[in-house]
Structure formats: C-alpha cells, structure tokens
Image (cartoon, grey):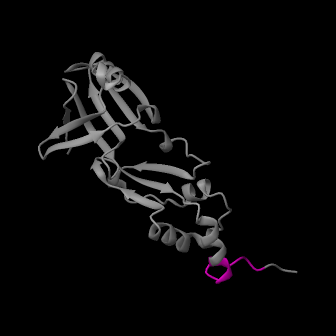
Amino acid sequence: MIILFSISAIADVYADAYLADDSGNLIFLSAWGRDTALQELLARLQLPRSENGIRDFNLVGEDGKNLVRVPNVDELEKVTTKTGHTILGDLTQLWIYDKLAVRPDMVNRRGLMLHNPDHGLIDPWPLLKSVCPLPLLDTWKEIMLAKCRQKKWIQSLNNGVGITGTLIELDDDLEAMMTQMIRQGELALPATNI
C-alpha cells in the first residue's frame, strides 16, 4: 500500500517515501507533483529563510505530522523525471537525497546505503571496505561489522516511510582498535607458506 504525505510548505506536492536521521535531518525524499510546484520547492530550498526559503517542513499523513529539517541543501542531490501524461495530467517525480548515497566520503570515512525495507537487510560490508582507510580481509567480516555496530560507526536509519538506510561513519580510533584486535588474535592474518 502506498502512503502519500502532503508537504506543508508547498501546495500540491506529495511524498511517497522519505528518510531522516535521528535529528530529523532529511536524507531522502521522493516527491510527486506538477513540474512548477516541484521547481518552487527546489527554489525555496536554495533561498535563505529571510526570502521565504525553506529549512524545514512537515510531511502530513494519516498518522499526523513528521517534521523534516534541511540544514544544508548543498549536501543533497536533486533529480527529477517526468512521467508523461496521466489521468491527473503531467506529473514529475523529484528525488532529493544525501550525496553520500552515491559518493562515499573517503577522506572523512563516511558512506550511506539506501534500501527498500521490503527487500530485507543490505550487507554493509562492501561499503565498510571501501571507506575504511585500512585493508580489510573478508574473513574479518563478522567481527568487524559487530565491532563497528557496537561503536556506533554503523547505524541503521529507520526514521521514515518506504525507505531505510545504513550510515557508516568511522572514527579516528579505528586504527588503534584494529591494531589491538590483531595483537589479541581477534583479527587473524592468513597463514603464509614459507
């Protein structure tokens, strides 16, 4: 069943999926409407508040209001596509999403995966390996994922509808933790034939 939310800041724009972090900051939004209404939304996201810009809005649905914040629109990608003529007229779909979902930040060791909750959990191991500054052996997968979750370096994002996410933010303590785990034998190096 598809749930539609009206967006309080713009008339005639509806969202069918969104995701926010624990602070309510927007990570993903799928919105539908006429092209002019969606272009108004995009323009107002770029403007400062003093010029009628939007930094937060409510998604209003059957379960009430969900406040979503947009603190830095420059960190978000925006993509639109036209559906063509429908019984409701010409509609456009807009996706707004965090750039980390398509371009992990290798310098700051951050990455984001977005996924459909109906398709089960997605394995964060490939993303962890790509943002980790140290090489990771596949035999370390389970223990490293467990340690990173314990340290809150891997977090599940479930504050939304129709989409979930996994955020990886590795700390500067990673190298020291891995060194200690190797010394204690928790991370075993492969045996070499000499």
Residue extending farthest to the right is 194
Task: Give yes or no for residue 34 being in the magenta stretch.
Answer: no
Q: Position of residue 178 (x, y in %)?
A: 63, 71
- Pick the residue in front: 113 or 65: 65
Q: Position of residue 157 (x, y in %)?
A: 36, 54
- Residue 172's place in the image compared with 160, above or below, is below
The residue drawn where x is 19% and y is 24% is 12
Tell me which segment is drawn in magenta.
181-191
Occupied quadrant, residue 27? top left
Task: Give yes or no for residue 185 being in the magenta stretch.
Answer: yes
Dominant secondary structure (helix, strand or loop) of the stretch shown in magenta: loop
* Screen quadrant of the C terminus: bottom right
- Residue 18's place in the image compared with 83, above or below, is below
- Pick the residue in front: 173 or 120: 173
* Screen quadrant of the N terminus: top left
The residue drawn where x is 65% and y is 65% is 136
Q: Position of residue 44 (x, y in %)?
A: 32, 22
- Pick the residue in front: 172 or 122: 172
Residue extending farthest to the front is 50
Horizontal arrangement in the rendering, residue 78 relative to residue 54 (left or right): right
- Residue 101's place in the image compared with 91, above or below, is below
Q: Position of residue 4 (x, y in %)?
A: 20, 37
Horizontal arrangement in the rendering, residue 33 relative to residue 130 (left or right): left
